[in-house]
Image: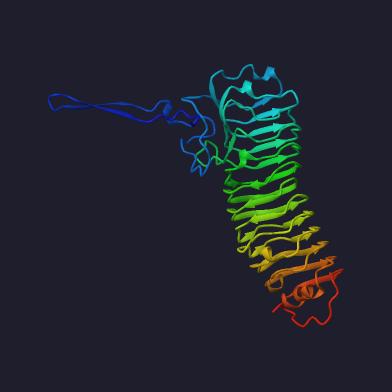
């Protein structure tokens, strides 16, 4: 159900017994004008997104709302309603969402520093714009949400969405983000120490930064991700597997740092260019970069590979056509010859090599 006053043209044909016909037509109500931002009954394909329980003709509210106490709830609609604006839920006094009533959907949603343990909306709420979930010390799950960018027409330009889930120490699951496909800005999932596996099977594009840092996730899976501006995977101490990344290029840096249990990169067989820096730092269980560098042709920034205690292979990095500069240091099990290959085989590269496993007589300079 979309919050709009566009009605369909209804024509009723009446046949008369003398073979005479007449047509009575009820014209558009409201002049066919958009109300609020969302102005199209079809936001685009939903993919696997479930259809929430809805209602007929919800009351539309177009004023942004900030809810900090029960007093702020007094003027809300009593029946089914749609918020064609932003909703901010803020502060420790917010311990339940039941008094929001039959809320069906919102544009942007912010849940900040609340006392919530769960998102106990009366029914699943669709979020068509941006999402911020931050500093909720008791919140355990992003249940009862269906988050997906509005792709239909609007009165004021297309939606520009970003999603941030940060600093929620009890959060264990991201159910509400499961069906996101497009993120115009950043997707940041950070400082959620109990978070389980991150499965974003339909995520295809992140225009800004994809940052997954300081979580409890044992696995990250983004198999449909074909376009991303920048990638940071940092400080996920339970992470063992990173899979997906079907992108052929990354528009900025790729940073893999401080994931102490990460042992498998899966395959990024299509990734041929990083238009920024490549940093692989302090991933003590990682032995092989083959999954990351198999098709790598260009890194337009610098390459830093340092402090990886069990790294023994750089994969096909020595076959790249362009690396601006490289620093390969303090990887105690990585043979010096593997680093020297980059220095000798990548045109015009400048390579700093130190603190790796000493090797002599490196005869196969280009890793034949």
Quadrant of residue 91 within the rendered picture: top right
Residue at image point 62% right, 50% down: 206
Above or below, 368 relative to 356: below
Q: Quadrant of residue 347?
A: bottom right
Frontmost residue, 49 versus 342: 49
Q: Residue at x 65, y 67 (%)?
A: 294
Residue 65 is left or right of residue 351, and the answer is: left
Q: Which quadrant is the C terminus positioned in?
A: bottom right
> Which x, y percent locates residue 160?
60, 42
Q: Picture coordinates of residue 180 (x, y %)? A: 58, 44
Between 300 and 273, the one nearer to me in the picture: 273
* Residue at x 58%, y 25% (from the top left corner): 122
Q: How is the image coloured?
A: rainbow
| Left or right of 275, for residue 3 | left
Q: Which residue of the protein is positioned furthest toward the left in this rendering?
A: 18
The residue nearer to you, when weighing 175 against 61, is 175
Residue 161 picture location, percent across and down: 62, 42
Task: Classify 50 as above or below 358.
Answer: above
Q: Residue at x 59, y 30 (%)?
A: 85
Q: Does residue 181 appear to the left or right of 18 in the view shown?
A: right
């Amino acid at each position: 159900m979309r919050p709009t006053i566009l009605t369909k043209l209804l024509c009723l044909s009446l046949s008369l017994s003398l073979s005479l016909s007449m047509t009575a037509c009820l014209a558009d109500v409201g002049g066919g004008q958009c109300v609020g931002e969302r102005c199209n009954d079809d936001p685009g394909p939903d993919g696997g997104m479930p259809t929430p329980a809805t209602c007929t003709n919800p009351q539309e509210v177009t004023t942004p709302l900030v809810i900090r106490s029960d007093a702020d709830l007094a003027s809300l609609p009593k029946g089914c309603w749609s918020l064609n604006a932003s909703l901010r839920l803020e502060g420790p006094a917010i311990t339940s969402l039941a008094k929001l009533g039959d809320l069906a959907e919102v544009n942007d949603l912010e849940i900040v520093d609340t006392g919530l343990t769960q998102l106990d909306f009366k029914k699943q709420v669709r979020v068509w714009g941006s999402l911020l979930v931050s500093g909720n010390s008791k919140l355990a799950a992003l249940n009862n949400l269906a988050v997906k960018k509005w792709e239909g027409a609007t009165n004021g330009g297309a939606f520009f969405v970003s999603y941030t889930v940060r600093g929620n120490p009890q959060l264990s699951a991201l159910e509400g983000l499961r069906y996101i496909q497009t993120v115009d800005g950043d997707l940041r999932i950070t400082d959620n120490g109990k978070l389980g596996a991150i499965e974003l099977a339909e995520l295809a594009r992140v225009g800004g930064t994809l940052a997954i840092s300081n979580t409890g996730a044992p696995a990250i899976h983004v198999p449909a991700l074909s376009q991303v501006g920048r990638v940071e995977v940092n400080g996920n101490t339970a992470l063992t597997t990173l899979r997906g990344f079907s992108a052929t290029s990354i528009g900025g840096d790729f940073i893999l740092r401080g994931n102490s249990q990460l042992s498998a990169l899966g395959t990024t067989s299509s990734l041929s260019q990083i238009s920024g820096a490549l940093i692989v730092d302090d991933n003590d269980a990682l032995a092989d970069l083959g999954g990351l560098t198999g098709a790598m042709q260009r890194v337009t920034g610098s390459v830093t590979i340092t402090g990886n205690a069990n790294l023994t292979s750089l994969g096909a990095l020595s076959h790249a056509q362009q690396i601006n500069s490289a620093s390969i240091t303090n990887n105690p099990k990585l043979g010096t010859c593997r680093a020297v290959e980059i220095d000798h085989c990548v045109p015009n590269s400048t390579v700093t090599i130190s603190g790796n496993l000493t090797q002599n007589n490196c005869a196969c300079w280009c890793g034949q």
